[in-house]
Amino acid sequence: MTLFASFPAARPRRLRRDGATRDLVREHRLHAHDLILPVFVQEGHQVSTAVPSMPGVARLSLDRVLALAEEAQGLGIRALALFPVIDASLKDLEGREAHNPEGLVPRALRALKAAVPELALITDVALDPYTSHGQDGVIDGQGRILNDETVALLAQQAVVQAQAGADIVAPSDMMDGRVGAVRQALEAAGHIHTRILAYSAKYASAYYGPFRDAVGSATSLGKADKKTYQMDPGNGDEALHEVALDIAEGADMVMVKPGVAYLDIVYRVKQAFRRPTFAYQVSGEYAMLKAAAAQGWLDHDAVMMETLLGFKRAGADAILTYHALEAARLLKG
């Protein structure tokens, strides 16, 4: 072996020499309290219905959601995001069940607040689980989404959720002006402390398929799409514009969805606004890892944790992920 006459003054590998040193100089860390667990809630008692396209995920009746919430809290997870599975008989063209004070989500909120009061509860402000056509808004005779009419219903939905105990309401519909309308409605109803997590940069993505299966909107939507209101995957600057509008309208936190394919957007949003920035590791991303791991092509836990750490490195303050329980168990050790 030939030795060089001079050696590099800087040897970055010195800081990778052993585990203790690597831990000391690590720039980003993942904690259980960075994770938000999405939960699909359905009617019934002692019911758990597996979602075939999302191994390990199920639609749960409220009693089972309560047990899951207690487990999540015990693992250090601080927030749940509720997504309802609505019976087809309750769906209509305008999604009126969305603002029923005795609907599935308000009842779930009240029960969860009584059982696990310290757990933050996040609700989805959107009409697609409730509409017979599967779109996120009211449609006209030609099937076009009516923006302002939809926004009025979303504001009603948000108030009903806040009254039932939602800590954070999360408009995920991508209608123009909905954050401002929701904020005004909450203030007028006296819910001045209810936070808004705006899905500010939500893309018209092909990654949502398993989620739509889970909530039952895939059948209703059929071959239609949501490209007239969700963002074009080719656009990045537009995401900054959307985020700026939502912050100006009163959003407390902003969301980028999907996650892995849009980490550049997470980074740009965080760098531009320095506001609480969340990312959603969506159903398709979850399903792909599960499928690859089932074939033995990937180390499931290692890739899961590396991916979640990637969200943190990109600038995400919190991550909605179906891996939340699995990751929290590993973090607890």
Image: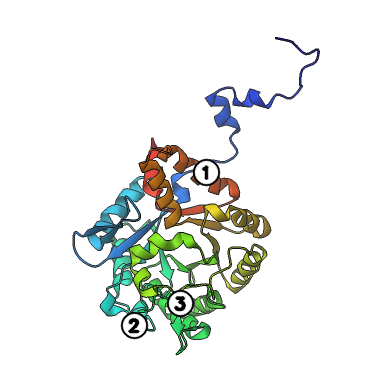
Residue located 34% across and 82% down the image: 92
The answer to whether mark 2 and mark 1 are in CB contact below 8 A is no
Circle on res. 241: none
Task: Tell me if residue 297 comes above or below residue 9 in the rendering.
Answer: below
**Disc 3 residue type (three-letter):** Gly
- The picture places residue 39, in percent across and down from the top left corner, at 35, 59
3 or 2: tag closer to the N-terminus: 2
Q: Which picture quadrant has residue 138?
A: bottom left
Measured in 3D between alpha carbons, the distance from the residue under mark 1 to the one under mark 3, in whole angstroms, is 38 Å
Q: Name the residue that disc number 1 marks.
A: 309
Residue at the spot x=53%, y=41% of the render? 29
Give residue 190's mark.
3
Report the residue that reaches farthest toward the bottom: 141
Task: From the image, state whether disc 1 or disc 3 is nearer to you.
Answer: 1
Identify which amino acid the numbered label 1 is placed on.
Leu
Q: Earlier in the sequence, mark 1 or mark 3?
A: 3
- Write down the residue under mark 2: 92
Residue 56 place in picture, x, y as percent: 32, 50
Circle 3: element type:
loop
